[in-house]
Amino acid sequence: MALLDEDRLFPLEGRARDLARALYNEVRDLPILSPHGHTDPRWFAEDQPFPDPAQLFVTPDHYVFRMLCSQGIALADLGVPRVDGGPVEADGRKIWRLFAENYHLLRGTPSRLWLDHGFQHVFGIDRRLTAETADWYYDHIADCLARPEFRPRALFDRFGIEAIATTEPATDDLRWHRMIRESGWQGRVLTAYRPDGVIDPEMAGFAENVALMGEQTGFDTTTWAGYLDAHRARRAFFIEHGATSSDHGHASARTEDLPQEDAAALFEKALRGQFTTDEADAFRGHMLTEMARMSLEDGLVMQIHPGSRRNHSDQVLATFGRDKGFDIPGRTDYVAALRPLLNAVGMDPRLTVILFTLDETAYARELAPLAGVWPCLRLGPAWWFHDSAEGMRRFREMTTETAGFYNTVGFNDDTRAFCSIPARHDVARRVDCSYLATLVATGRLAEDEAPEVARDLTYGLAKRAYKL
């Protein structure tokens, strides 16, 4: 018995369902472009087998373990590493059994759809995961992982990935990307420039990171001019290793275009650790504008994804570190916040700024109107807590009438869970085809135009926007 309904996520009404199915069949096998994500480049550099099913599906996926945590299951019992290297559960089978016993908690969630897709399409499984089937699942997947065709590079090719971007901090040495390039393997694994650690004065280790950037580039990063030159040098280094984009995950969308002497004064305060909360935010905001100006010089596409109230649990942050499922969406302003950057450089055709949000209330009110007029702006897809069938549908319904399709950038999966990549793209393709079918069935899109739009939403928009 198949785990998945072949017509999942398609409209219920007959003609719209038939149209959606026909559109989907035209795009289902197009190559995957994954221009924004967090898979580990070391997987592709070393091409070693994944350790065990738990390390593949459970321990790295905060979508999975945050749900289990919400029901009182300890992260340590799921093998999530502690920052101090302290003991956590290391027995993959024991972790898997705990996961299987609680698999019902994921009913109705995107994670359940992604996991079942991986089980069925990657590992050929046709029975549901339960406490009773846990050991069978574990043995079957472990046996598969021992085979050459389930190593990272082989799965990369099998998934039909044309290009995938990882995300590294500005001070990363990019050793794994260099190893991939020197190996002669033809898989296209790109990096993306993530400078938050050398832009955000409130991040731990900011001054040390800035000093390291100076050592790496030879510029005096105790000075404002040297600091900016060091950014330019690091961006060039990332571009040499395939980067086509930068990635900025600030708490707010605030931008500033300060006089250079004011920006230099804020930078000096940041290095000394003597700043107010507003001064830190102003510095981050000004640096977004500086990054945009640098994009005019070097061509990197700029991604801004504000609005995450990170590390909501002090205890989890202290014990397990960042990115452990406790980043929570918050309200975000874009209209006033982006105005300084847009007025500084937003009409320049060389600039592309891709905006993401965790605040759905901003779609129709702010983001679609902004992207529908400013030449530099494009809307990133529904993502993170909204990269789901309902979230994607809401995104299209709330943005298309004002921004159209061609001020968006298709889909990205933003995942650390490798086997969920084809599943997530499949969901996006089904949802977009269903939306297009509804437009055709209700007389808002010509039937002969829909296939072209479907191909653009699946492939063309991302390829163009991210310069892939």
Image (tube, rainbow, N blue to C red):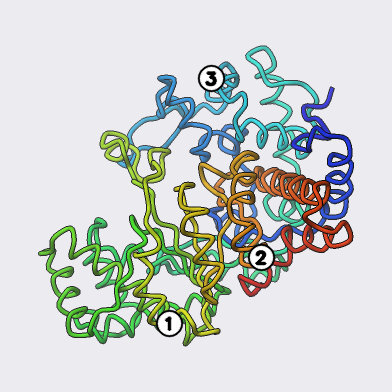
Drawn side of residue 25 relative to residue 436, left or right: right
User: Quadrant location of the N terminus?
Assistant: top right
Q: Distance between the residues labelled 2 and 3?
A: 38 Å
Q: Given the image, on which type of amino acid does mark 2 rest?
A: Ala
- Would you identify the image quadrant in which residue 241 lies? bottom right
The residue labelled by disc 2 is 462
Coordinates of residue 465 in the picture (x, y in percent): 62, 71
Q: Element at badge 2?
A: helix
In front: label 2 or label 1 = 1
- Would you identify the image quadrant in which residue 317 lies? top left
The residue labelled by disc 1 is 345
Question: Residue shown at 78%/28% (left/top)?
Answer: 125
Drawn side of residue 69 relative to residue 255, left or right: right
Coordinates of residue 222 in the picture (x, y in percent): 19, 79
Q: Which residue lies furthest to the front in this view?
A: 443
Q: In this view, does 39 lie above or below 462?
A: above
Residue 115, numbered label? none
Q: Given the image, on which type of amino acid does mark 1 rest?
A: Val
Q: Given the image, on which type of amino acid does mark 3 rest?
A: Leu
Residue 98, numbered label? 3
